[in-house]
Image (tube, helix red, strand yellow):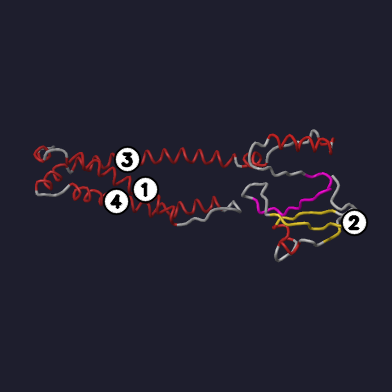
Amino acid sequence: MAPPGGGGRRYVWLTEAAARRLGYGHPADAVGDRYTDEENRTVEVAGILGDVRFRTARDVDEALMFGIGATGGTLTVRLAAGDPRPAVAAVNALVDTLYPEARRAPRGFADEKLEAQYRTEERQAKVFALFSALAIVLANLGLFGLTALAAARRTKEIGLRRVVGARVVDIAWLLAWQFARPVLAANLLAWPLAWWGLHRWLAQFTVRVDQGPGTFLVAGAIALAVALATITLHVVRVTQTPPAGALRYE
């Protein structure tokens, strides 16, 4: 594939990271500049491309140069949305015609290669999700058992409160506050540990999300809501018993 213009001149496209690494304050300032390569050919910057990531988020932005007329390297083609098979067949036919020696060169899609690089993270996510779900189930079972025991032990008290006119909401709030305090204390203890663990894990990525307080507040609110729902369930069950029966409860 001959370069545009001929005469031994090469045209290249730089990514924004490459332009910044070459010392340009603004990447667009590199357009039109010329230099001489190792083969004593004139190379002109024809344009600037957005940063392209061919590696994982652990790697820094790559400073890339795309050229026409260079030997070796990789040919990258961007396909329009839709069925890629016709475009892939046309590109393969053109490459096989222009470069017969490249017939056996490996070919594939960039998204498939990127997906293969994140398989370790996918496995870690599945294992983490499995153990997290198991921990949540066990914690809820423990909370369910504790609230059932507390409600059973205070059956007479609940019956007396109902006799003197206490509402179900008042009784539920009384027990809810008893269990809400440990849940809140557990969240205050877990938040710094969770933040530290996430910070250590995210530090290995050059591109990462910020850890805002919203994630921890939502997690704590969900835990508190589960605890309150469990307590309310037991209170409603106990209050359905006639007060006389509750007073005779042993």
Residue type indicated by callout 1: Ile
Q: Position of residue 67 (x, y in %)?
A: 79, 50
Q: Which residue is mark 2?
A: 40
Magenta stretch bounds: 59-73
Q: Position of residue 228 (x, y in %)?
A: 29, 47
Mark 3 or mark 2, which has the lower sequence index? Answer: 2
Q: Which residue is mark 4?
A: 180
Compared across the picture, whether 195 is left or right of 223 comes to right
Label 3 neighbourhood size at 10 Å, few (<14), some (14-19), many (20+)? few
For discs 1 and 4, the disc positioned in front in the rendered view: 1
Q: Disc 4, disc 2: CB below 8 Å?
A: no
Q: Disc 1, disc 4: CB below 8 Å?
A: no
Given residues 64 and 171, the one toward you in this image is: 64
Compared across the picture, whether 135 is left or right of 115 comes to left
The image's mark for residue 92 is none
The answer for how far apart the CA atoms under marks 3 and 2 are is: 75 Å
Q: Which residue is mark 3?
A: 142
Asked if residue 62 lies in the magenta stretch, the reply is yes
Mark 1 or mark 4, which has the lower sequence index? Answer: 4
The image's mark for residue 222 is 1
